[in-house]
Image (tube, rainbow, N blue to C red):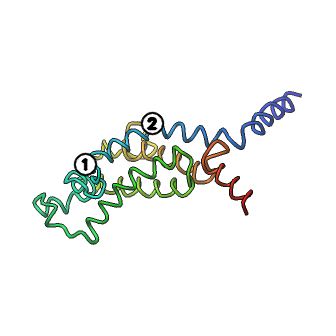
Amino acid sequence: MLVRLYAAVFGTLQRLTDRWLIGLAARFVFASALFVYFWNSALTKIGPGLLGFLEPTDGAYVQILPKMMEAAGYDTSAIEFFPYGLIVLLGTWAEFLLPLMIVLGLFTRAASLGFIVFIAVMSYVDITGHNLDAATIGTLFDGKPGGLIADQRLMWGFLLLVLALRGAGAISLDHLLARWWRERY
């Protein structure tokens, strides 16, 4: 009797929320915990003015290519645009576009996969380029949830993996586009 009640209650909850809650909740958590963080970080990487998004700042180069900037004496003109300047430019754009797409639920699965790669690259650069210490990096299963790389970014990655596998849900631009596509074609 208790098992049937348990299965009925949670089965009903799952059926009522399956198509919309997980994607919406994951996007809400991403928006509240990570969107402003990455948006502010991206703002430090663009130049002034209307076309500033076409000209990354020196800080963008320092954040994305720290060892190369050090070797160039912190002179961005000494760094070739192709491929390095292009990497900085595309990385800056990705830091703006991917979080925005995730929050809006627009091409959420692809944006989430792209952001998982972005976070992996960011973590690699933080460890190897910015020489983070072992305490900041942390380790998995160490019982200390404050490790900025091992623990924090594992949680970010899991949140994004949920979105990549489950999608944005019924309350998203993805859902509206899919419905429009089905009606049109």
Identify which residue, 131 or 108, lies in the foreground. 108
Front disc: 2 or 1: 1
Q: Residue at x 37, y 55 (%)?
A: 93
| Amino acid type of the residue that numbered disc 2 sits on in the rendered structure | Ala
Residue 49: mark in rendering: 1
> What is the secondary structure assignment of the residue under circle 1?
loop
Q: Residue at x 21, y 54 (%)?
A: 62
Residue 119 pos. (x, y %): 41, 53
Residue 115 pos. (x, y %): 46, 54
Residue 63: mark in rendering: none
Number of residue marks:
2
| Residue receiving disc 2 | 33
10 Å neighbourhood of mark 2: few (<14), some, or many (≥20)? Answer: few
Residue 81 pos. (x, y %): 24, 69
Left or right, 73 with reference to 44: left
Residue 8 pos. (x, y %): 84, 33
